[in-house]
Amino acid sequence: MGTAVAQVIAQNGYKVNLWNHEGDLLPLEQIKKFGENKKYLKGIKLSKNINPERDLEKALENSQVVFFVVPSNVMSSLVKKVVKFLPCGVVCVDASKGIDESSLSLVPDLMSKCLREMVASISGPAIARDMAEGRFTAMDVSSKNKKAIAIVKQVMENKNLKLLPSTDMVGVEITGSFKNVYAIAMGLCDGFKMPMNTKSALLVVALQEISLLVEEMGGRKKTVYSLSGLGDLVGTGLCKISRNRRFGEYLAAGFKKDEAVRKVKQIVEGIGASKTLKRLSDKYKIQLPFADMVYRIIWQNKNPKKELESFLRNINFS
């Protein structure tokens, strides 16, 4: 996704420094040598405006907008590294979407406390390859600062990418993060050859549960049915190449958590998000039985087929 975001911005005519948080230099070397991220976006020719940079300080030098496109569980440590090199007055954009697992703080709140810069968030149904190929994509952009929203729209929007402004950062972050948990359940359904009727019903339940949490945390229910909510849930839950959906499919095939992750070959954010969602439901004293089912399968090694069949027998749409 980091490469895809860089591609969109670079094709809009901006110079983009691309740095990899994982310490894996191969994608950067591939981009420099071939103009292509063969590891993650094979076959897509990248803009010459993208400069792969191994050094974090150099990558941030003279930046005006910085996009954080990393797993939410590494945001805290990355922000602490970035703060030393960040130019004053930049806009920091969270594309990680979610909650810091240790503090249960929203990622933009975590960023604001440490960086003291303008912070915005982008979230929505955005498959990286589709974005990089220039397929039409629409997302929410949220911030408490109207100037930050305007700047993000300026550098990202074009005929193939549209951003819908929102001031509901709570709603955008919660929906964007926890759709991954329910996407795992969609993968379970695919693994067990369950029909679209079943998956459609479960998507309704997922939206109901997300709505409960969003409102409890001070967000707006309307956001749940926006691009970052309903849009992202459908995109991630039903897309064949979605890593969270594929992880669920591997669980259904009998692979344990760690084995399934190895099969996916990418970070599966829904795993950590399921634990965080469980902690939040306990904290706010709300019932999220669908999310609890996914949690039990992942963290308590419960039988996926039995858990899903039991949930369907006792499903509650109220």
Image (spheres, rainbow, N blue to C red):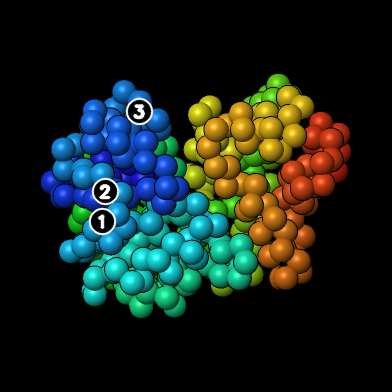
Q: In the drawing, what numbered circle is on residue 59?
A: 1
Q: Quadrant of the N terminus?
A: top left
Mark before the other along the chain sequence, 2 or 3: 3
Q: Earlier in the sequence, mark 3 or mark 1?
A: 3
Q: Position of residue 41 (x, y in %)?
A: 36, 30
Is residue 128 placed above or below 68 in the rendered structure?
above
Residue occupying image coordinates x 62% and y 66%: 102
Asked whether the residues under the numbered discs 2 and 1 touch, taking CB atoms below 8 Å apart as contact, a structural biologist would say: yes
Q: Is residue 313 left or right of residue 63?
A: right
The disc placed on residue 53 is: 2
Q: Residue at x 48, y 71 (%)?
A: 110
Marks 3 and 1, how far apart at CA: 21 Å
State the image quarter where residue 183 is shown.
top right
The residue lying at 27 percent from left, 35 percent from top is: 31
Say left or right for 268 vs 318. Answer: left
Residue 300 showing in the rendered view: yes
Residue holding disc 3: 38
From the viewer's perspective, is residue 206 above or below residue 250?
below
* Picture residue at 36% right of the left edge, 71% below the top: 83
Q: Is residue 198 above or below residue 221?
A: above
Q: Amino acid at mark 1?
A: Ala
Residue 186 in view (yes/no) = no
**x, y percent for residue 279:** 71, 63
Label 2 amino acid? Glu
